[in-house]
Image (cartoon, grey):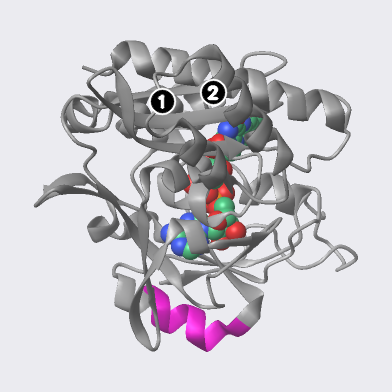
Amino acid sequence: MSQVAPGGPPAGVPGRMPVIPGSFAYHRPKSVTEAVALLADLGEDARPLAGGHSLIPMMKLRLATPEHLVDLAGIRDLKGIRADGGDVVIGAMTTQHEIGASELLAAKIPLLGEASLVIADPQVRYVGTLGGNVANGDPGNDMPAIMLCLGATYHVVGKAGERRIPAREFYRGAYVTALKPGEVLTAVRIPGPPAGHGSAYEKLKRKIGDYATAAAAVLLTMSGGRVATCSIGLTNVAETPLWAEAAAKILNGSSLDPATVKRAVAAAEAITSPASDARGPAHYRTKMAGVMLARALARARQRAA
Ligand SMILES: Cc1cc2nc3c(=O)[nH]c(=O)nc-3n(C[C@H](O)[C@H](O)[C@H](O)COP(=O)(O)OP(=O)(O)OC[C@H]3O[C@@H](n4cnc5c(N)ncnc54)[C@H](O)[C@@H]3O)c2cc1C
């Protein structure tokens, strides 16, 4: 279904007032097939619309000027959280609020609920979706680093069919991802961490509702008082979310003693390259990534059986 552009004709057309975003046509498909066909027909001037809490602000600033919005909100198949064998599959249009409220996730992957609760504020979380958060490519978004940490895979559908992209290969630069024009991210598949794992997400922000100055996600398992497995993701300290593989390797086999944690923190800091901005100078943000990592490691350790 297509409707008249809510924005009306472009500024300057007699008798009509301009609105803040540029004008666009609105489409509301009922299925993924219909959405993909629409995006293919409309070409590069069309964008999927999910919760709109990143895209609409960009449009109001005229940093994004799509001529067509293909709203995914009417596609039931894109909603929901389900177990699938040892994995958990979350539909792209599942909201951040629904992730925070999910009993299945609380039992299997508590890291997700914890992270969703530090995203923005309740109003944003009621509408903002997981798919939008991870597809956006904004290094300030919290969920991408969580997905790197958890080893998630993104299900993507385009005119050529479905492909599955590991989150760790998805992010190429600020707002640049492996998504091709016309593709829709339909779901996120996450391998269930082993029972007894510990996890934590530590986020430094200037105030409630802010994006991270720096944040760190940790998932680990312990065996006989030593780290058996460890994975680390970092938020907003580079143009993309970071998977701190070398830092995690340093921790494997250790008892998380202070000297080893210090070496791992240094390895994590070494891969960061944040911008100096209103959240602080680059060096400060790198150091805060290290502090967040040390805190997340300590909390994940406490939580591990
Ligand atoms: C005041 C405020 C504070 C915020 N603070 C935070 C924060 O602290 N942490 C954080 O992580 N986020 C924050 N956000 C962003 C928020 O979480 C967004 O909701 C989220 O980043 C994008 O999700 P969305 O569903 O709103 O996507 P949209 O805004 O609709 O889309 C974002 C982008 O992804 C594309 N897209 C969306 N869904 C799909 C899909 N299924 N397939 C392909 N492409 C798709 C769109 O075309 C668009 O380019 C904040 C937003 C606001 C307004």
Residue 249 in the figure: left or right of residue 253: right
Q: Report which residue position mark 2 lands on.
A: 260
Where 23 falls versus 191 (above or below)? below
In the image, which residues are magenta?
35-43
Where 10 falls versus 272 (above or below)? below
Q: Are marks 2 and 1 in contact (CB under 8 Å)?
A: yes
Residue 107 in the figure: left or right of residue 97: left
Q: Report which residue position mark 1 lands on.
A: 254
Verify whether residue 90 appears in magenta: no
**Earlier sequence position, callout 2 versus callout 1:** 1
Residue at the (64%, 18%) spot, across then down: 291
x and y, in percent, of residue 235 in the image: 61, 37
Residue at the (75%, 23%) spot, across then down: 287
Identify which amino acid the numbered label 1 is placed on.
Ser
- Quadrant (top left/top right/bottom left/bottom right) for the N terminus: bottom left
Can residue 210 be seen in this snapshot?
no
x and y, in percent, of residue 74 in the image: 33, 58
**Front in this rendered view, residue 19 or 286:** 286
Where 6 falls versus 220 (above or below)? below
Identify which amino acid the numbered label 2 is placed on.
Thr
> Where in the image, quadrant-wise, is ligand 1 located?
top right
Residue 149 in the figure: left or right of residue 153: right
Where disc 2 sits, the SS reads helix
x and y, in percent, of residue 110 in the image: 29, 26
Residue at the (48%, 31%) spot, across then down: 217
Give the overall secondary structure of the magenta segment. Answer: helix
